[in-house]
Amino acid sequence: MSDDRDRLARRRTAQTHFRTEALLNAAQRGSREHLKRLGKEWPEDISYSKKALIIVFDHLEDAIRDLAFPADASGYPKGARVGSLL
């Protein structure tokens, strides 16, 4: 009986890790839906939490950059200096 419970617990843990990795990968690719889900389904595992935090910070950094330097028709940020683009 104990062996069955152990197997079931390992299977649930593996499924949880698989779902968490899928959520983090989708959020990393920029899926707004999955980024929102992170707010409700924050990973409990410390390594996944660290990865989730890095993903959120990366997206925030991109959003702040877009707000600070909106691209003009040429694709370059308005008012940006060439040196700042390197």
Image (cartoon, rainbow, N blue to C red):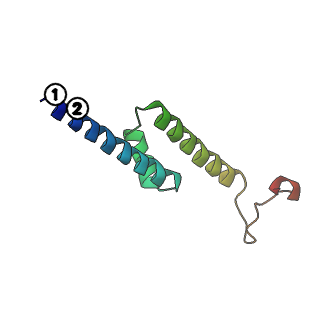
Q: Report whether 27 appears left or right of 63.
A: left
The residue identified by callout 2 is 6
Classify 53 as above or below 58. Answer: above
Q: Nearer the viewer, residue 64 or 1?
A: 1
Residue contact at pointers 1 and 2, CB within 8 angstroms:
yes
Q: Quadrant of the N terminus?
A: top left
**Residue 59, percent across and down?**
58, 48
2 left or right, relative to 45: left
Q: Is residue 44 above or below residue 11?
A: above
Residue at far top of view: 2
> Residue 2 bears which disc, if any?
1
Q: Which mark is residue 18?
A: none
Residue 77 appears at what percent x and percent y? 75, 60
Q: Residue drawn 59% across and 41% down?
A: 57
Left or right relative to 39: residue 7: left
Amino acid on which disc 2 is placed: Asp
Circle 1: is it few (<14), some (14-19), or many (20+) Cα within 10 Å? few
- In the depicted view, which residue is nearer to us: 79 or 54? 54
Residue appearing at x 39%, y 46% in the figure: 37
**What's the amino acid at mark 1?**
Ser
**Which residue: 28% across, 37% down?**
10
